[in-house]
Amino acid sequence: MSNLRLGVMGGTFDPIHFGHLVAAEAVAKAYELDSVIFVPTGKPWQKQTDTSAKHRLAMTKLAISYFPDFRVSSIDIVRAGDTFTVDTLRDLHQEYPGAQFFFITGADSLAGINTWKDSDKLWDLAHFVGVSRPGHRLEVPNSPHGAVTLLEIPALAVSSSEIRAKVISGESLEGLVPAKVLDYIHENNLYQGNQ
Ligand code: NAP
């Protein structure tokens, strides 16, 4: 058993960018987390991804290599079937018995948590943190008092969809993604409309 306080950064990361990394750092500081585990989704239940899980996982590993307190887990990719957060959190509780979890994701996504599988079971598995750019409001009806918080992250002005559009139009990604991720995108010809 441990007293670890662990962030679980859930997202498609298609691709991962500085907004995600700054958000994870901000939540880690605000909640005094020992570590943040980035968990790229395998097969997102409610959407299509541009890029294979293999590439999204590889880019996430490269991005977090700059941060000693961040880790990456492939649990949502190796588990068969659609990705459900209830499975992510149950698996992590098994892997880290006694740890306290803080599930971090975009506030837009978290607003739909009531539609997620076994949503009523989620509140016992983690505290939920929705990260957003300033000015966003987060309302999660039917969530227990204090179960969900919103944290404003100015760096989240950057988005994965904007980055994908910039690749297609040949614009620079300088300052939006870590250098190793930039190299990976170019070496693998990602986001050219040919995946
Ligand atoms: P997504 O489509 O990748 O992202 C939706 C929005 O949230 C985008 O604006 C995105 O910005 C932002 N975002 C996503 N992850 C973020 C993060 N970690 N930090 C900051 N911003 C983030 O995400 P999604 O498919 O909704 O999934 C988000 C998480 O919720 C995943 O862990 C997923 O498994 C979980 N989820 C679970 C269920 C379920 O259990 N049934 C259903 C839906 C989602 P960027 O595009 O810039 O990243």
Image (cartoon, rainbow, N blue to C red):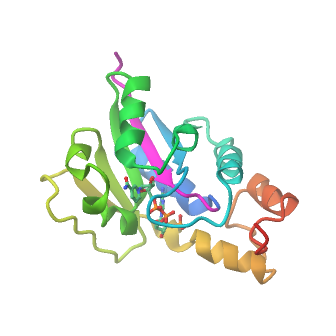
Drawn side of residue 15 relative to residue 25, left or right: right
Disc tally is: 0
> Can you name the residue that lies furthest to the top here?
1
> Can you name the residue that lies furthest to the right here?
187
Q: Position of residue 23 (x, y in %)?
A: 48, 56
Drawn side of residue 155 relative to residue 182, left or right: left
Drawn side of residue 156 relative to residue 161, left or right: left
Drawn side of residue 90 relative to residue 124, left or right: right
At x 68%, y 56%, the residue is: 52
Q: Tell me the quarter of the picture where residue 109 sits.
A: bottom left
Picture quarter with the C terminus = bottom right
Magenta highlight range = 1-14
Q: Nearer the viewer, residue 144 or 172?
A: 144
Q: Position of residue 53 (x, y in %)?
A: 64, 51
At x 55%, y 62%, the residue is: 19
Q: Tell me the quarter of the picture where residue 139 sits.
A: bottom left
Above/below status of 94 relative to 156: above
Above/below status of 121 relative to 192: above
> Can you name the residue that lies furthest to the front here?
81
Q: Position of residue 143 (x, y in %)?
A: 17, 56
